[in-house]
Image (cartoon, helix red, strand yellow):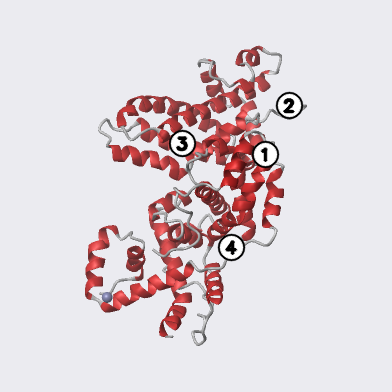
């Protein structure tokens, strides 16, 4: 039987894997299939000559006009991904639903020293004159930001570390701690109906679980592969964008508009 | 693997002086210096984004996003790396995010259907006539037309495989597809390209 279209495509891209021996053997003995492969190669080479995609004259000026105003006030990207999420966040935060309460309680029991300065002192926030709802929202915002910061720092260390698996034990413990918080944050995100953030947290959780559950005898190759996945998913990148935005004063949770009551 | 102008340059190529100067100026607090990078790399990134999205307006959104991300991440760019390679990577990631979002919004069930389809059942335009000599620009246009006939998902999967050199596994992960679905998207895309372009290959070959 001759090679199929799928066989030839996989062979062309070097992805025939388990089928490689069969395909190679057949090509060695069949002129028709060699000819078919040759035609495929020439056809796909034509794709590279495509003239498509060239933007119109003046493109650079247009693009500059689109981004110029956003350079001084950075980070609308994540805001747009969240789209209508901010309103739902505010609702979720102020309804004191199960996840939010649990989350808040968890926060109170935690070490406060890592809360970033941009959010003001947590002690001030907690004992200030703001309404309980506003305080809770603020706390929630700080907590989410704090969690994302921690996750980002941890993943950055994993991604930028060397191939030596010696650092694994420490990272495993950190990952394990982060998984627990991540689940609470995720519940809150899900409650707020924020699918974009929920998706990011979902990806994050899977990666954290992988790290937390990494076996003692993990090989250097496995370790490298795990770290490479961070890159593939763009996870670290996405976390950084979010953390940067929060540092710029745009927390994932917007304060509720003035005058609105829950 | 054929050579083409869309892959980024080797990562050890020296960074252009104006890029270096612009990065230094931006880092020193002058956001307007960033324009140099837009001028130098904007068109290139647009072609990269267009090839993945198949739409100029979408590609503009992706490039805008990519530049904004690059701006925010500029402090993390390592001077010894090649800026265009770095920007290329950011643009591809932005395009993938964009395509994923589009997929979720617009075609919730299309992915699942791929396994049951066997290609060839999508209406094809008439194969180009081989009985005339085609200049290379005409071939380029013909290729562009053929690419326009791919579905957005086929295009994205095919381009990630063909131009970006991503493995089918990686493509599945990036686009949120099962590996089999990613594979079928690539198969179907290549099949469409063969139907449209093999007559050209034969015509050129026979001259
Ligand atoms: Zn054969």
Q: Chain of mark 2?
A: A
Instruction: Say whether disc 3 or disc 4 marks the residue closer to the N-terminus.
Output: 4
Separation of marks 4 and 2 at Cα, in angstroms: 50 Å
Q: Chain of mark 4?
A: A
Q: Residue at x 61, y 20 (%)?
A: A117
The C terminus of chain A: image quadrant: top right
Where disc 2 sits, the SS reads loop
Which quadrant of the render holds ligand 1? bottom left
Residue with the mark numbered 3: A204
Task: Give residue B207's position: percent from left, percent from top.
Answer: 43, 85
The answer to whether residue B123 is seen in the rendering is: yes
Question: Image point 49% across, 26% down: which residue?
Answer: A150
- Look at the numbered disc 1 and give the secondary structure of its residue: helix
Q: Disc 1 beta carbon < 8 A from ligand 1? A: no
**Dot 4 alpha-carbon crowd within 10 angstroms: few under 14, some 14 to 19, many 20 or more:** many
Q: Quadrant of residue A119?
A: top right
CA–CA distance between discs 4 and 1? 28 Å
Instruction: Give residue A105's position: percent from left, percent from top.
Output: 54, 18
Q: Is A159 drawn above or below residue A24 in the view shown?
A: above
Q: Position of residue A207 (x, y in %)?
A: 41, 36
What is the number of the mark on residue A261?
A: 2
Which label lies toward us, 1 or 2?
A: 1
- On whether ligand 1 comes within 8 Å of the CB at mark 2, the answer is no
For residue B31, which numbered disc appears in the image? 1
Residue located beneath label 4 in the image: A53
């Amino acid at each position: 039987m001759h090679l199929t279209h799928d066989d030839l495509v996989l062979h062309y891209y070097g992805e025939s894997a388990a089928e490689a021996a069969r395909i190679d053997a057949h090509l060695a003995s069949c002129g028709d299939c060699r000819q078919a492969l040759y035609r495929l190669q020439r056809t796909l080479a034509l794709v590279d000559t495509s003239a498509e995609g060239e933007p119109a004259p003046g493109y650079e000026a247009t693009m500059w006009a689109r981004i110029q105003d956003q350079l001084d006030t950075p980070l609308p990207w994540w805001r747009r991904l969240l789209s209508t999420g901010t309103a739902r966040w505010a609702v979720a935060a102020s309804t004191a639903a199960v996840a939010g309460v649990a989350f808040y309680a968890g926060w109170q029991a935690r070490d406060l020293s890592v809360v970033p300065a941009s959010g003001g002192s947590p002690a001030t926030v907690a004992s200030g004159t703001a309404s309980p709802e506003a305080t809770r929202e603020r706390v929630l915002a700080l907590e989410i930001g704090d969690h994302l910061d921690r996750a980002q720092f941890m993943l950055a260390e994993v991604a930028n570390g060397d191939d030596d698996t010696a650092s694994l034990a420490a990272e495993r413990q950190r990952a394990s701690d982060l998984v627990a918080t991540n689940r609470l944050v995720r519940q809150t995100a899900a409650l707020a109906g924020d699918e974009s953030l929920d998706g990011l947290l979902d990806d994050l959780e899977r990666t954290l679980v992988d790290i937390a559950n990494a076996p003692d005898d993990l090989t250097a190759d496995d370790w490298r592969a795990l770290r490479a996945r961070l890159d593939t998913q763009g996870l670290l990148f996405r976390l950084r964008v979010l953390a940067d935005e929060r540092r710029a004063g745009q927390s994932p949770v917007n304060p509720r508009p003035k005058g609105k009551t829950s | 693997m054929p050579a083409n102008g869309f892959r980024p340059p080797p990562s050890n190529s020296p960074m252009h002086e104006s890029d270096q100067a612009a990065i230094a100026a931006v880092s020193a607090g002058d956001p307007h210096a960033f324009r140099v990078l837009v001028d130098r790399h904007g068109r290139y990134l647009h072609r990269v984004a267009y090839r993945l999205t198949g739409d100029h307006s979408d590609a503009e959104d992706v490039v805008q996003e990519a530049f904004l991300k690059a701006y925010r991440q500029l402090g993390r760019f390592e001077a010894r790396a090649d800026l265009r390679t770095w920007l290329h990577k950011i643009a591809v990631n932005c395009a993938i995010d964009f395509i994923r979002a589009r997929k979720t919004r617009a075609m919730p069930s299309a992915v699942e259907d791929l396994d049951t389809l066997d290609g060839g059942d999508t209406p094809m335009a008439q194969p180009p006539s081989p009985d005339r000599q085609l200049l290379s620009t005409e071939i380029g246009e013909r290729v562009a037309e053929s690419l326009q006939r791919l579905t957005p998902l086929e295009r994205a999967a095919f381009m990630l495989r063909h131009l970006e050199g991503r493995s089918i596994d990686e493509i599945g992960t990036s686009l949120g597809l099962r590996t089999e679905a990613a594979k079928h998207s690539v198969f179907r895309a290549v099949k469409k390209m063969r139907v449209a372009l093999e007559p050209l290959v034969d015509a050129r070959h026979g001259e």
